[in-house]
Amino acid sequence: MFTGVNFFLTDELLSEEERMVRDTVRQYVEKRFLPLAAEYHDKAEFPLEVIPELAQMGLLGVTIPQEYGAAGSSYYIYGLAMQELERGDSGLRSFASVQGSLVMFPIHRYGSEAQKQKWLPLLASGERIGCFGLTEPDHGSDPGGMRTTARKTENGWILNGSKMWITNAAIAHVAVVWAQTEEGIRGFIVETDRSGFSSSVIKGKYSLRASNTGELIFEDCFIPDENRLPAAKGLSAPLSCLNEARYGIAWGATGAAMACYDEALEYAKSRIQFDKPIAAFQLTQHKLVEMASEIVKAQLLNHQMGRLKDEGKAKYYHISMAKRNNVHQALQAARTARTILAANGITDEYQTVRHLLNLESVYTYEGTHDIHTLIVGEHLTGSSAFR
C-alpha cells in the first residue's frame, strides 16, 4: 500500500480535512484505478466507468461552489486530489482537470446565471462530460493567433474552424470553445450534437494513451447567442482557465514522481545483484536521494502555491514556475526510476514507463517547459522574449 513520501514531514502541514481527502483519493487510486491502468493504457481508452465514481467523491469541479452541485472545497484540497489522481495516471488527472478547471471554471467565472444553473450540476455529477477548445493545429504556444472564427448572425453565431489536441474530444457532450470575432476573442458553450460539429480521435499516441484526445471541427456550426459566455472578453479569459489547469498539473506531476520513486525504492530493496540488494550500492542510493530531494522541493513549492492560491495571492508566474519545475523533475524522476528497474522498467508489470511516457506530454501541454521559462523570465526581468 502506497504511504506517500513524507521525508520532510510535509504531512504535518496538512489539516485534518486535507489529510482525509488526500487519503480517500489515495486509497481509491490504489484499490480501484491502478488495477485498471495497464489495461486501459494498452487499449488506448479512457475508463468511462470511473467517471461517476470521481463525481461521487467530489473530484469534478472541486473548487466550484456547492450551490451548483460541486464540492466547494479549497484550492489546496484540489491540488492534493490532483496529486493522487496523477499518481495513478496522467490521463486520470487530465480528465478531472479538464472537467473542473477548463470547463466548469470558465462557465462559473464567465457564464450567465442561467448557464451556471444548467451546466455546472450536470458536469459536477458526471452526467455530462466537457472539453476545452483553444489549441489549434497551427497555434499551440500562441493561442492569440487562432483562426477559428465566430460570425454574428441573427440570434446567434456561425462557428468555423478546428481545435487540436483536445482532451475528452470524442466523449464530450459539451465544449467550451474560443474563437475570433469582430469584437475580439470570445468564449462559447457548444453542445457536441449540434449540426456542423464533429470530432475525431488522434490515433497512434505513445503518451497519454488512457486519455481521450482528439480534434474538434466546426463547419458553419450555429451557436445561439444564449450560449456565449457573456463575461469572457479577450485572450485573458482562456488564459485564466489555463492557469487553473496548470495549478493542478504542478500537483499532479508531483504525484507521478512519487509513484516512480516509491516503485524504484521498493524494487531496489528486493532486487539482489552481486549478493546484496541494489539499494545497498552507492550509485543506486545517489539516484534515490536525488529523486527524494526533488520530490520534497516540489511538495514544498506546491504547499506554498496552494496556500497563496486560497488567499488570492497566487500569480500566474508563481504557477508557471511550479508547473515548469515540478513536471521537469517528475520526468527526470521517471527516467531515473527506469534505470533502477532496468529491463523490468519497460514492461507494464511496473508503472514507471507509463508515467515516463505520459510525462513527455505533460512537459509540453498547458504551456511548454520553454514557454513557462519565458513567462517567469519576463516577470523577473521586465522584458518579454515572446516576440
Image (cartoon, rainbow, N blue to C red):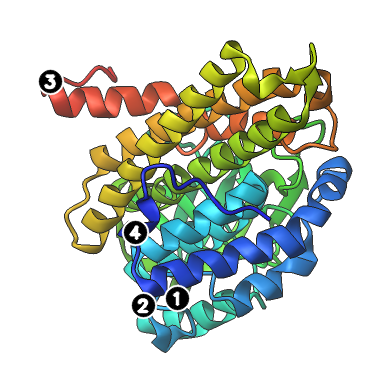
Q: Cα distance, mark 4 to mark 2? A: 41 Å
Q: Cα distance, mark 2 to mark 3? A: 39 Å
Q: Residue furthest bottom?
A: 67
Contact (CB < 8 A) between labels 3 and 4?
A: no
Question: In the rendering, at what x and y percent does residue 152 appear?
Answer: 43, 59
Name the foreground residue: 83 vs 383: 83
Nearer the observer: mark 2 or 1; the answer is 2
Contact (CB < 8 A) between labels 4 and 2?
A: no
Disc 4: which residue:
12
**Which labelled disc corresponds to residue 381?**
3
Contact (CB < 8 A) between labels 2 and 1?
A: yes
Question: In the rendering, at what x and y percent does residue 220 appear?
Answer: 62, 54
Q: Residue at x 56, y 27 (%)?
A: 333
Residue type at mark 3 is: Thr
Disc 1: which residue:
226
Q: Cα distance, mark 3 to mark 4? A: 36 Å
